[in-house]
Amino acid sequence: MKKRYLLPALLLMAYSVVGQAPKYKKADKYFKAYQFAEAAQAYEKALKSEPDNAIVMAKLVQCYVKLENTERAEFWLNKAMDAPLTDASYYRELAALLAVNGRYTEAGLLYEKAVTANDEESVKWLQAYKNLNTFYEDSLLYKVNKVSFNSGFSDFSPAFYDNGIVFSSSRSNKGKGNKPEKNYTGFIDLFYAAADAVRPIPFSTELNSKYHEGPLSFNATQDTVYFTRSNFHKKPIFNREGVNNLKIYYAVLKDEKWQNIQALPLNNEHYSVGHPALADSHTLYFASDKPGGYGGTDLYKIIKVGGVWQPPVNLGPEVNTIGNEVFPFVDEKGELFFASTGHPGLGGLDIFYAPKEGDNFKKAENVGYPVNTPGDDFGLIVKGDAGYYSSNYKSAYDDIYTFKATRNKQLVLLAVNQEGKPLSNVQLNISLADAVPGKTVTLESSPSTIDWAYGEMSRLTVSKRGYVTSEVNFAKEDFFRYKALDTVRIVMPEKVAPNGDRLVQVTLIDEEGVAILGGKVELTDVNTGSKEVHVVRGDGSVAAVLHSGKSYRLRGIRQGYNDAVLNISGHRMNEIIAENELNLRLKAKELFASLKVGETIELEIEYDLDKADIRPDAVQLLDNLVAYMQKYPGVQVELGAHTDSRGTSVYNHALSQRRAEAAVAYVASKGVGQNRMVAVGYGESQLKVSNAKAEAQHQVNRRTTVTILSNSGL
């Protein structure tokens, strides 16, 4: 087990207590007051009368981790694993301790037991640990390094200032006569380190008191600071549980000194507020364990109106959990970064980000390895693609790290004919991920350079009159397989077929001439009745060979459109097909207008394996639903998602729920009120082919459904 060191007074961490009998009250009191040596002794004494109490053992593990007693922590963790558990939350608590030690397989087994015991909170953790690779898929983007000025004490929570950072540290600040707290090294002060610093200096004699000063945030002009400080008046003030709570203070810079130090009005003697993060001059985010939150410590924001701070607003369930959310930071794009124990992660505190959405934030996402580790990772700040964060991974203390992400590169695209000759004036369509509309450009010469942003490009499609359209698909991980300015070579054969036959490119288009994605082209030989079905490529086209002298019927098919049919007689083939290209124009039709309450329609939406992203071909179908719901504002619908039977039922249910939620999120992004839609993941509970073996049968089971719940005003 690795050594770990926490500074609970500034982490605002809330821990659960045993609270089952009077004999644990004393131990719980020690634990909550961070007196871990005394707590460990009291818990061990209590275990003599209840030797199988796994939750007490879990507390012992945490005590010995804090005390850096690896041998005793490992001993009690293994005993807790063998003890009988009576509550699903105990499985969760032990699983979290296993994750801190990198024992994810064992943690996953405990989460599975918790899910079996109907613990809904464990479902997301089980899903995460069944797909552990998702935490590592972006790891090659980052380069992380420890800064040179870390000490043998705890250094953490940086904030940008001047040409460097201000951070919190329990290292010595000479001249103050610091005395170490029990179980901890020393009082925490603020230090400044320039970008090239080797030895930091105390930041401010005005702000550094004889007690704790911690996480802070500066305004844009860096003449006002909001900072965390222990609650004291000449001496520390403790609440009735023996905890010295935190408060947020602010100060202004005048004559090169920080002056007018005042407490914010949101402070309270009965709970902590801390970790201030300014988004702008009138919006402040912070962490607090105030009553009425979702868990131990939640994130809040306050807004200044007319010079007066308004009451705090909880950031809600997309950000806050039953665990602890701490150390907020808002970047220049308005994205929120924070640390959490309640969202699935690699262990301890992990760092998450939540994109801005109006006045709120979207669902938080894990930043991933190597920034996140089995240790506590927190206090991230970023400018552009670089920044700082704190971690105690493989260390007895918190250290500060730098990170830099490489998210953009260029590729060289070389389009050639079958003889290897470069082609000019090629049309290039770049398909983007996450259903974002792509773009089409003309490459006047070949080779040409193209920009590639990580996670954004999914397909390159090249076309040129007289040549077969070709494409290259890109998975997210392909970004790491290509170096900057690597060449992507695409061969585009001329449209010729043997023996005078015709190789024809057939494209499905709508009434406005836009390519239709996800459709099919049915090619029938009129004389023999033989039929070929071609699935369109990323540009909405197929390549089909038409034999000289034969007659054909072409049918374009796509859900949400009327079929388009074209008959081609053998003697008129050259007249109908110009330059080996042919368009089939499909007319859109309403999919939902005739549906009544309770009726269901299946949408031909396909997903990539184990993914919930809305693909570009699905967008066109969902746009039908958008148009319908905008036309009839009284309609309410259920969007259901179904999986095949491969994988566990728990995993499939979670995957289908994510897919249903992704469909709802897309429709909502087009202006349809989210309160008019319900996302339901059915998993494998309603299979259409119960004993599916072939891939086509599995595809029948994978489907998205729309059910009309209400059509008032229709």
Image: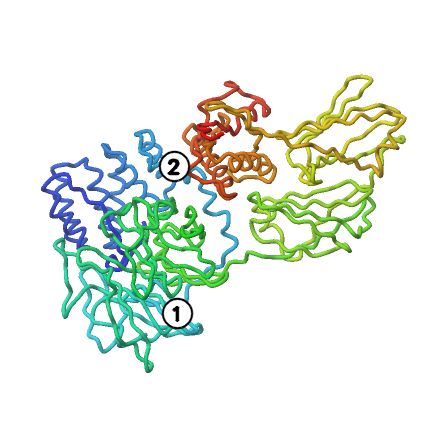
The furthest residue to the top:
528
Q: Which x, y percent locates residue 601?
A: 53, 25
**Which residue is at a point 58% across and 25% down the rendered structure image?**
695
- Tag 2, which secondary structure? helix
For the question of whether residue 193 can be seen, the reply is yes
Q: Which x, y percent locates residue 189?
A: 27, 69
The furthest residue to the bottom:
255
User: Would you name the residue on which mark 2 appears?
Assistant: 126
Cα distance in 3D space between marks 1 and 2: 38 Å
Viewer-side residue, 81 vs 709:
709
Occupied quadrant, residue 411? bottom right
**Which residue is at a point 41% across and 59% down the rendered structure image?**
330
Mark 1 belongs to which amino acid? Ile
Q: Nearer the viewer, mark 1 or mark 2?
A: 1
What label sits on residue 165 in the rendered view?
Answer: 1
Left or right: residue 474 versus residue 290 is right
Lower position in the chain sequence, tag 1 or tag 2: 2
Left or right: residue 153 versus residue 240 is right
Mark 2 belongs to which amino acid? Leu
For the question of whether residue 369 can be seen, the reply is no
**Looking at the image, is 645 positioned above or below residue 43?**
above
